[in-house]
Image: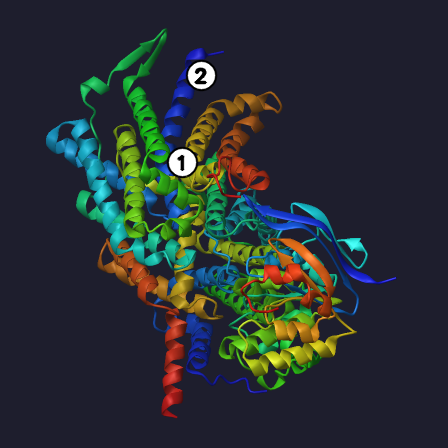
Amino acid sequence: MDWNLLITQLMNGLQLGLLLFLLASGLTLIFGIMDFINLSHGSFYMIGAYFCGTIVSITGSFVTGVLIGLVGVFAVGALVERFIVRYLYRKDHLDHVLVTFGLILIFDTLVHLLWGPSGMAIPLPDALNGQVSLGSLELPSYRLVIISAGLLVAVVLYFLVAKTRLGMLIRAGASNRSMVEALGVNINRLFLIVFALGTAMAGLAGMLIAPITEASIGMGNDIIIIALVVVIVGGIGSVKGAFYAALIIGLIDTMSRSYLDQLLQLVMPNTYAETAAPALSAMLVYILMAAVLAFRPQGLFPPAGMK
Amino acid sequence: MADYLLKITDLNKHFGGIIATDNVNLSVQQGQIHAIIGPNGAGKTTLIAQLSGQLKPDSGDIEFAGHSIISDSMAHRARQGLARSFQITSVLMPMTLLENVMLAVQGCSGHSFRFWGPVARDRDMRSAAMASLAAVGLEDRAGRTAANVSHGEQRQLEVAMALAMKPRMLLLDEPMAGMGKEEGAMMVDILNSLKGDMTILLVEHDMDAVFSMADRLSVLDNGHVITTDTVENVRSNHEVQKAYLGDGHA
Amino acid sequence: MNWLPVTVSGRAYALLLLVLACAPFIFEWANQPFYLDLLSRALILGIAAISLNLILGFGGMVSLGHAAYIGIGAYCVGIPSYYDFYNGWLHLALALSVSAGFALVTGAISLRTKGVYFIMITMAFSQMAYFVFLSLEEYGADDGLVIYSRSEFPEWLSMDSSTGLYYWIFAVLLMALFFTKRLLHSRFGRVIVGSRYNEQRMQALGFNTYRYRLVCYVIAAMICSVAGMLLGNFTSFISPDMMGWSRSGELIFMVIIGGVATLFGPLVGTIAFVLLEEFLSAITIYWHLIFGVLLVLLVLFGKGGIHGWLEMLDRKDVDHG
């Protein structure tokens, strides 16, 4: 048993899980509170990466890049909400799908226009680019940075949702929108904040991963699907659900890619195991989603008050 | 011995802290018009919803024609002969009156996994549908879209659709809601004409209508049945008067 | 019976079908074989769009995973061909049965949900299919699968030539249109349409709407898989990209441009989409931007699509008459 590999893969799973959490938490709130399907959420992931990269190339500081990038993504998200999304809440879901699909096209092309077709590499400062030793194991320190950042956001978000007034409104809105309106809250402002906050977190995820994978056009369009699965499994409107579901899915996805073929080899001939494993590990996350839907359609941790 | 078509036993339903249906016991005799009255918020629509299968009760039983339907779906109950009309008009707005009623006929006559023959050419279904429309006085408006007829006519359509299902029992939730005096009177005539052949359980606010139609009355208050009795006895019942205090219907 | 179209839209569609029927000859005479290819592709997507409209437009089920069936249909040509099984009837039978099976299983799960959930789940399932095919190294995965010979049919039905394949496509298109029309007016169709207007009402009338919608979903999937089979033959190159969720999004776009819940809407919408794509991409590489803006504007301001516009012309006719 290769313990080093196991721990590395567990860390990878944790990392993926936390990134998914950043994406899914915004999505689940937008779905839950505003009943709005935002297919373009992945575009903010991409925009975050590009903003950060540009600022890093100007200032040379990764931290500055992240901070200013966050503000930038928040601003873009706010603008999109104010001038496009706001007019769609009353329309049906098909319209949401079409408009946000259109937004993806627009954002992808705008990025192409502004930054060109090839991706953008984001260099890491030396301080973050080293290795950390855990016993006999050497881990890239950036991995730990991502994990810490993800956990930090999770804690901040928990505090926000559970202990502040804004959080209370969010929780109430997730299970009963009309009640929140009846309380006389400025719904427009609440929705704007929730949307922009959600997109900012997506942008953060993009910024964190970009030094490893490069910022590229359309980078959000595939991961958004997994984020959606996380939202479904966790329960629409539930940040807690998004957290646990993201970790579960991140771990399952990573571990199955590494170990499924070995597992399968225990029960079937090697050649079959080799072809079946990648296909099966690709399907695993969706099978989980289907299972959750079959037995607990409201998700694993639905927001309180939802039946 | 009386023939009970519908028998509700110890029915309970609560939403969080609110008790919507509180140990309701009620039986409807075959061929009678049984009305449920009560102040707003008494739980009348919730009761109808549980009877038709839209809501699942927390406990209790509902028996229809001798066997329990408590775990049957809405569609299943409809096919067993329990037809419902909705308090908030729930007809298919973009379709014509005729198309609406033909669907009602279709729903309770065999399956609809027929992919080829145009429904418009099915003479039997057409004439059955027209008959139901005629029973409520809407036959000359059959070709109009449901969205383009008056509110009262839409309520009549609801009843026509329920009739077209050839049910054994009608569950009518405020059939006269929002109707004018003339239309309301017509509805009372229609329902009275059905007495004997059809069993009807209806919820209504219009007291004059209820008193002129119903064989028996049940009074619901806070989810609980205060009394079930004949019209005269209910009218002179003190508890009922208390429940309606301020309503002016003594 | 009066079968000559009377409305502006009816006449427009009849003319369109006539032109489509003669297209190979028109393009040969004008010496523009490229346009026959363009039209072939448009009509294939048109068949897929018509099948999507059945569940989305008429049935009210917004599926963001319909393109998966195009991919399945295509791979049902590709994989047998890889093993040297070129029999066209085999390909067709495979496409129909595999798509029906996939639709039955995924539909059974998806249709238990509504609204946001349904859209996301259909999206997720089609991505699942995409990733499965992407992981099959044997059949090309990312690089795709090339086939060297088209599905084999008896000589009079052969799709080996461009014209032969075109008429195959045209025939399937006509069948799809005709079948959809009959379906909508049948008992089954009425239930599907009624369920879109008011599902609870339909249940109160005695219809087990879940079952009917599932069958509708499977039928739409099967029709779409035939489009996929034709696409596989047309491009001779089959890749998982055919089945991604953004492809499904494009299909929805095509249906909306043409006019949702109309018979010919998806066809004209698809043709318009393909022509627009061709035209715009020749002008600028940033044509996706224009597309995106168009989409946003269409949703915010336009309704009824091309069909709606034709119907408006009809009303103007009546006013003058």
The percent position of residue C220, horizontal first and vertical second, equals: 55, 58
C235 relative to B91 in the view: left or right = left
Q: Residue drawn at (60%, 20%), measured in percent from left and top?
A: A266
Q: Residue drawn at (20%, 34%), measured in percent from left and top?
A: A52
A7 relative to B225 in the view: left or right = left
Q: Residues within 10 Å of mark 2 (few under 14, many from 20)?
A: some
Query: Residue A117: which quarter of the image?
Result: top left
Instruction: Give whichever of A203, C6 is nearer the camera.
Output: A203
What's under tag 2, amino acid-wise? Leu
The residue where tag 2 is placed is A6
Q: Chain of mark 1?
A: A
Q: Chain of mark 2?
A: A
The percent position of residue C28, horizontal first and vertical second, equals: 39, 70
Of callouts 2 and 1, the N-terminal one: 2
The percent position of residue C317, horizontal first and vertical second, equals: 38, 87
- Local secondary structure at mark 1: helix
The percent position of residue B178, horizontal first and vertical second, equals: 53, 73
**Gap in angstroms between the C-alphas marked 2 and 1:** 29 Å
Badge number at residue B38:
none
- Local secondary structure at mark 2: helix
The residue where tag 1 is placed is A239
